[in-house]
Image (cartoon, rainbow, N blue to C red):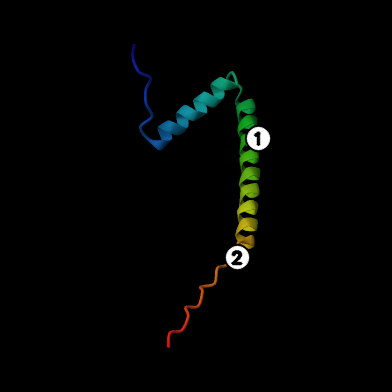
């Protein structure tokens, strides 16, 4: 059996992904676009959620103050 053609450039990889999206949507370009936009909106919302969680976690973190060493003498 022969191996499937491998994408060699970013443009080739993008073309493969576009063809896969179209194949999943049975050639319906509007449906493929709709699915991709929905997925993108989900990912953007997830990024915002994670960013908020990281910011809140960072704000709660207490800055450790260095302990003063006892004076000798």
Q: Which residue is situated farthest in the bottom direction here?
A: 73
Closer to viewer: mark 2 or mark 1: 2
Q: Residue 57, relative to residue 67: is it above or below? A: above
Residue 38 image-quadrant placement: top right
> Within 10 angstroms of label 1, few (less than 14), some, or many (20 or more) residues?
few
Left-right relation of 17 to 28: left
Q: Secondary structure at mark 1?
A: helix
Residue in front for this viewpoint, 39 or 62: 62
Residue in front for this viewpoint, 10 or 66: 66
Residue 46 image-quadrant placement: top right
Residue at image x 50%, y 25%?
19
Q: Secondary structure at mark 2?
A: loop
Q: Position of residue 22 (x, y in %)?
A: 55, 24
Q: Residue 43, relative to residue 68: is it above or below? A: above
Residue at image x 60%, y 61%?
61
Q: Quadrant of the C terminus?
A: bottom left
Query: Which residue bears the numbered disc 1?
Result: 38
The label shown at residue 5 is none
- Label 2 with label 1: CB-CB less than 8 Å: no
Q: Which residue is situated farthest in the top direction here?
A: 1
Q: Position of residue 33 (x, y in %)?
A: 61, 31
Residue at image x 33%, y 14%?
2
Separation (CA) of disc 2 from disc 1: 39 Å
The label shown at residue 62 is 2
């Amino acid at each position: 059996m022969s191996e499937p053609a491998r994408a060699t450039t970013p443009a080739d990889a993008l073309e493969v992904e576009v063809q896969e999206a179209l194949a999943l949507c049975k050639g319906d370009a509007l449906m493929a676009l709709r699915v991709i936009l929905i997925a993108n909106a989900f990912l953007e919302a997830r990024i915002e959620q994670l960013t908020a969680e990281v910011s809140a976690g960072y704000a709660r973190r207490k800055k450790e103050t260095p302990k003063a060493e006892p004076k000798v003498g």
